Image (tube, grey):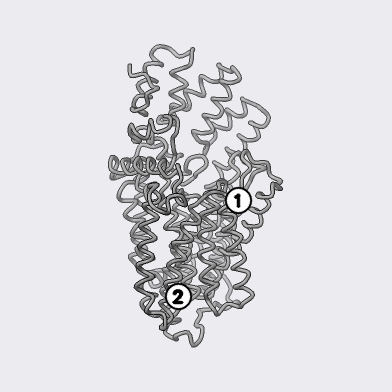
Amino acid sequence: MKNEAAIRRISLLVLITGPLVSLIITPFANFDPINLGKNLVLSGFGFAIFALFIFSDLGLRKRLNSGLWIVSVLFIVSMVSSMLFSGAPITQQFWGIFGRNNGFINYLILIFLTLGVGLIQDVNFYKNVSISLIVTATIATGYAIIQTLGLDPIKYSVQQTFATFGNVNFLSAFFGISSSCAVALIIDRKNSNLNRSLLAALVFIDLIITYKTGSIQGIMIFVAATGVTVFLWIRSQSKLRVLWAPYILLGILGIGLTIVGLANKGPLAKFVFQPSVTYREDYWHAGWVMTLKHPFFGVGLDSYGDWYRQYRGLISTIRTTPERTANTAHNIFLDISSSGGFPLILTYLALLAFAIRASFKVLRRSREFNGTFVALFSAWLAFQVQALISIAQVGVTVWGWILTGAIIGFEKVSIQTLATNGSKKISRRVSKKAELSPVSALAALIGFGVGIAIAFPPFNADMKFKAAYLKGDLVAMTESVNLLGSSAYLNGVVLEYALKNSAFAQADPLTASLNERFPRDWFGWKVLYLKQSSTEADKKLALAKLQELDPFNPDVPKS
């Protein structure tokens, strides 16, 4: 009974975590209104989940493959190794950079989520995971419509349709994932006609919004995942077996034409090609070079931006202007490999391999179209496609890791469920009378508090910075960027503010602090080189650093 109560609490926490992380924003508290609140929620609930399944004696080794536990531990060890030996600033690696926050703590919590979801192994829960994704999409759709109509009460620096994700591409990706999930539920005739109609309306609206944003990635991942969903439905219909071969050939042709179209060639070029595709190739190239140059420990967690200028090459440097830079590879796999080298990317791929293996096992056991599984698998596949072309934004990424755990856990329980051939539903329903032990309840509460405390420093530093920035208080701004959890970006913002307001006395220590704490930050060395108060020795040091950090930049003097 104790275990059942813990599983029920973990289930509830997971179903709350996904929607909250995607939807929460803190525009009235933070300079970064999108990510920091999401990270705070993710950390609090993630540590609570971890505490529950550690202190509740759930028979962890029996519920999940021991190999999965080994891979998860190795992934964490690889991150720790990168933090210790990559040479990047520890605090930057721990919490991540401004506007991304894909540091150690984020990925640690995502591992907790995947394992927690995989442990539950209840059919009803996994169905609720897909429902919670749809509910999240519904709320995001409502907010996106408000933004589209120009009625958003929050005055962001850029007024666009991005709902609670901060960027039209992230909203587009999320809608591609949620719509892929919805299509599987629409096809499933076990759902009521009313629900299927409502889901169809949601998909239609979300695809229209996605198209209006001009971001094609949501459409692309939706088409790819839905194509697989339709194939699985055809596979389940014995009368349609004759369509298998032509459908697969059509899919291969579509993939080929899409790849060619991304290179601005072929009949699909006018639909899928955008100038940003070329820029992404630059970012991918640099990420791969970082991986090859730093194969064991990477360049540091979430530290891609510190090395981009050095490894982007001549063509990328002069393609537009040298000031076009990036702090992410725009490919989650390359972000991970560049952050932690081959050990980190290989353990991540091994983690995904468990989900792939589980998926094949489920599909091999039965040709029946299982709406719950296909919804999870389709959304998971959409996320993986998105991971090839976009950024790990926590409001979207949280679903990728939840879905990974859901597929792994669903495979375990499907042994019983699929054995019935759909004659009845078998669910390991947890008794609502089960009570959580005092030790487990206390552990969960402490875990939540620890998670909040760990994620709070960057939230607090950013919050204090915004308050000072709105007042134009340079002294308070300077104090805020010296707080634990502050970032190189905010330090640079304060330095630029001081220079624009001729506060040169304050600019000198800000420059020194930036270069000392974040020695690969371009802006700090540029200021040191250009400042009139810099000594000849300072200028010589700064120039050497600029040449090292950006060797192909024609604007940097060569001597």
Give coordinates of residue 173: x percent, y percent: 51, 54
**Residue at 54%, 77% in the rendered image:** 430
Q: Where on the picture, by quarter, is residue 497?
A: top right
Q: In this view, does 469 lie above or below 505?
A: below
**Residue at 39%, 60% in the rendered image:** 254
Q: Mark 1 points at which residue?
A: 164
Query: What residue type is disc 1 on?
Result: Thr
Query: What residue type is disc 2 on?
Result: Trp
Q: Is residue 116 above or below residue 286?
A: below
Quadrant of image for the C terminus? top left
Mark 2 or mark 1, which has the lower sequence index? 1
Distance of label 2 from label 1 (alpha carbons): 33 Å
Give coordinates of residue 417: x percent, y percent: 45, 81
Q: At numbered mark 1, what does the secondary structure look like: helix, strand or loop?
A: loop
- Disc number at residue 435? none
**Residue at 51%, 24% in the rendered image:** 510
Q: Is residue 118 left or right of residue 22?
A: left
How many marks the image carries: the answer is 2
Give coordinates of residue 162: x percent, y percent: 59, 49
- Disc number at residue 233? 2
Is residue 390 in view from this perspective? yes
Which of the pair 81/204 is nearer the observer? Answer: 204
